[in-house]
Image (cartoon, rainbow, N blue to C red):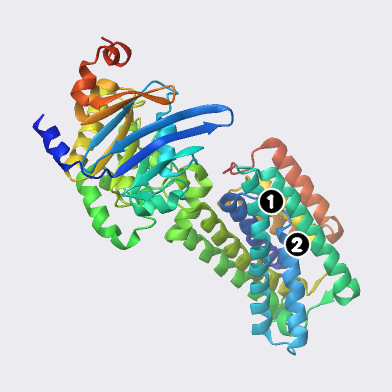
């Protein structure tokens, strides 16, 4: 029972990272109309920026977090014109071309991280951000402060996102474009401007996810982005491409599934088992558990 | 016809002037040197068969499709090649063919989308729209896909009104609606016109449209074949044969 509770908590905290990543990915898909499956690479890039700033400022947490969030926003803004350019040249949205661009961005980041930071060795985050001593330990359960932080930040950010989506002017425009881009344009929603708002918002989500990842994983390597991006793409497809609520449920479910496998079977098998389960789901429901939104 | 005479007196400057507008989709010429004018407080109808270019003309005026040649002026300002959202802000709006209602969003959200550029006045405009369309107030928290065809058309018109437009363009409002509902929709357009809105309407249902419009243009394969006051068009033998089933 103690293992179970511990692993559920672990699963929820890593699941909240998946939820944030899938939400950012889906937002870009729905509003900016791009398939940016290298989005997790951008997030890992922000993790490196956080690490660098922590090192330079003698572990000033606030500055590290600010740098992480702003680097992700900045990175999204730099890549946005590239995406817009290939779509405008085709007159209509061509989502396939955006995948090649996303792939290129992903590989450039991976290569830069392997050569320009820490000689390509994995980076270690300081105890200031991860927390060193467990908050408490009962039998087998030990909870690190980083986990508690990650889970609470995850809950706050995800609920904030959904409030924004359903209660604000920008969120209303996001939903309208997601449902019918041509119709949204006819009622006077500016597509490019709203698209840029979605880049900014997914940047904020990505930067905060980088902070969460640093708290949970304590380290990062250049290949981390690629590993995570496979899972994020799989989660979004299993949930139903572009389905935000679906991504929320499936992201948390994947986190819990992985944690339970690690707790009861073996950590070495968690990826394979997770993907086998997702394979079965997608064979039974090819359009995803919750249905596609695009 | 007294109404028409007062309108002629008011005809100083047109609100909308389309000058020799040509639009093509690749090799296909959808519009060929089309010129129309709409004066303030008029209801003008575009009549034509499927594929005559009515929808293309309305969406080109809004700025969806850039013309290959020709000009569009709204209140004296050149507006072709101006982005759609700017034109909406300036007071042109389109109620699209097939309503274009956002089915998964609530009625209220749909209305607020219309007010995207005009949220400051949203309470005033909502109150007015609810007064004209009480059914929408009753259904404001319902998802739009639960509405009937007629209610959706009302929602689409109400959403357009939320942007505080000067010119309302309505594309084929009668399509797919029962005749009794079509009458309601035309009554609404006449009522809006009396409230001061200028209406540009496209319709295949020529008889009913001409009955409520002041003037009309007949579009045939991308060109204006005929134009004139509604009574003139209603009595034209060619129009009678082609569009009125007489």
Q: Which chain letter matches label 1? A: A
Q: Quadrant of the N terminus of chain A?
A: bottom right
Count every numbered label the image shows and give the total.
Answer: 2
Comparing A287 with A82, the one in front is A82
Percent x, y of residue B185? 25, 33
Which one is in front in this view, the residue at disc 1 or the one at disc 2? Answer: 2
Residue A252 seen anywhere in this rendered image of the structure: no
Q: Residues within 10 Å of mark 2 (few under 14, many from 20)?
A: many
Residue B155's image quarter? top left
At 17% from the left and 45% from the top, the residue drawn is: B195
Residue A154 coordinates in the image, percent (x, y): 61, 68
| Residue at image location 18% in from the left, 23% down from the top | B231
Residue B244 in the image: above or below residue B3? above
Q: Which mark is residue B73?
A: none
> Judging from the image, what secondary structure is the residue with disc 1 in?
helix
Looking at the image, tell me whether mark 1 or mark 2 is earlier in sequence order: 2
Q: Measuring from the top left, give residue B216's x and y in whole percent.
A: 27, 28
Q: Position of residue A71 (x, y in %)?
A: 68, 72
Q: Quadrant of residue A279?
A: top right
Of residues A137 and A71, the one drawn nearer to the viewer in this rendering: A71
List the residue tagged with mark 2: A41
Report crowding for label 1: few under 14, some 14 to 19, many 20 or more residues within 10 A (C-alpha): many
* Residue furthest left in the image: B2
Q: Which residue is mark 1?
A: A235
Q: Nearer the viewer, residue A115 or B20?
A: B20
> Which type of secondary structure does the marked residue at label 2 adopt?
helix
Quarter holding the C terminus of chain A is top right
Residue A64: in sight, yes or no? Answer: yes
């Amino acid at each position: 029972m103690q293992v179970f509770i511990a692993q559920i908590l672990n699963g929820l905290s890593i699941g909240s990272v998946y939820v944030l990543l899938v939400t950012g990915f889906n937002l870009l898909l729905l509003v900016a109309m791009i398939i940016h499956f290298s989005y997790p690479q951008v997030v890992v890039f922000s993790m490196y920026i956080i690490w660098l700033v922590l090192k330079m400022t003698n572990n000033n947490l606030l500055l590290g977090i600010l740098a992480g969030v702003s680097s992700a926003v900045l990175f999204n803004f730099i890549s946005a014109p590239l995406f817009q350019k290939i779509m405008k040249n085709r007159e209509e949205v061509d989502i396939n071309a955006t995948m090649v661009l996303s792939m290129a961005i992903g590989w450039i980041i991976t290569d830069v991280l392997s050569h320009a930071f820490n000689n390509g060795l994995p980076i270690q985050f300081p105890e200031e951000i991860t927390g060193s001593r467990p908050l408490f330990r009962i039998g087998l359960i030990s909870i690190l402060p980083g986990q508690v932080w990650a889970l609470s930040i995850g809950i706050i950010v995800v609920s904030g996102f959904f409030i924004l989506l359903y209660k604000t002017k920008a969120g209303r425009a996001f939903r309208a474009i997601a449902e019918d881009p041509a119709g949204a344009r006819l009622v006077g929603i500016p597509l490019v401007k709203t698209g840029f708002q979605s880049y900014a918002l997914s940047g904020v989500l990505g930067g905060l996810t980088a902070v969460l990842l640093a708290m949970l994983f304590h380290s990062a390597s250049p290949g981390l982005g690629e590993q995570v991006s496979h899972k994020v793409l799989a989660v979004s497809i299993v949930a139903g491409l572009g389905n935000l609520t679906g991504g929320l449920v499936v992201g948390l479910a994947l986190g819990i599934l992985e944690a339970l496998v690690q707790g009861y079977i073996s950590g070495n098998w968690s990826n394979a088992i997770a993907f086998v389960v997702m394979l079965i789901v997608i064979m039974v429901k090819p359009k995803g558990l919750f249905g596609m939104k695009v | 016809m007294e109404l028409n005479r007062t309108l002629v007196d008011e005809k100083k400057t047109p609100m909308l002037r389309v000058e020799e507008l040509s639009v093509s989709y690749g090799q296909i010429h959808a519009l060929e040197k089309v010129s129309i004018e709409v004066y303030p407080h008029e209801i003008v109808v575009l009549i034509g068969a499927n594929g005559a270019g009515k929808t293309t003309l309305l969406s080109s005026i809004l700025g969806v499709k850039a013309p290959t040649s020709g000009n569009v002026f709204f209140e004296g300002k050149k507006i072709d090649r101006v982005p759609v959202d700017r034109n909406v802000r300036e007071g042109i709006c389109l109620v699209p063919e097939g309503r274009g209602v956002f089915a998964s969003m609530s009625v209220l959200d749909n209305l607020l989308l219309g007010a995207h550029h005009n949220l400051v006045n949203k309470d005033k405009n909502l109150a007015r729209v609810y007064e004209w369309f009480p059914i929408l107030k009753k259904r404001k928290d319902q998802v739009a896909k639960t509405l009937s065809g007629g209610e959706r058309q009302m929602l689409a018109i109400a959403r357009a009104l939320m942007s505080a437009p000067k010119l309302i363009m309505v594309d084929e409002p009668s399509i797919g609606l029962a005749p009794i509902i079509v009458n309601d929709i035309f009554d609404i357009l006449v009522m809006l016109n009396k409230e001061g809105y200028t209406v540009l309407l496209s319709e295949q249902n020529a008889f009913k449209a001409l009955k409520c419009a002041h003037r009309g243009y007949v579009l045939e394969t991308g060109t204006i074949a005929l134009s004139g006051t509604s009574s003139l068009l209603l009595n034209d033998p060619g129009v009678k044969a082609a569009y009125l089933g007489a």
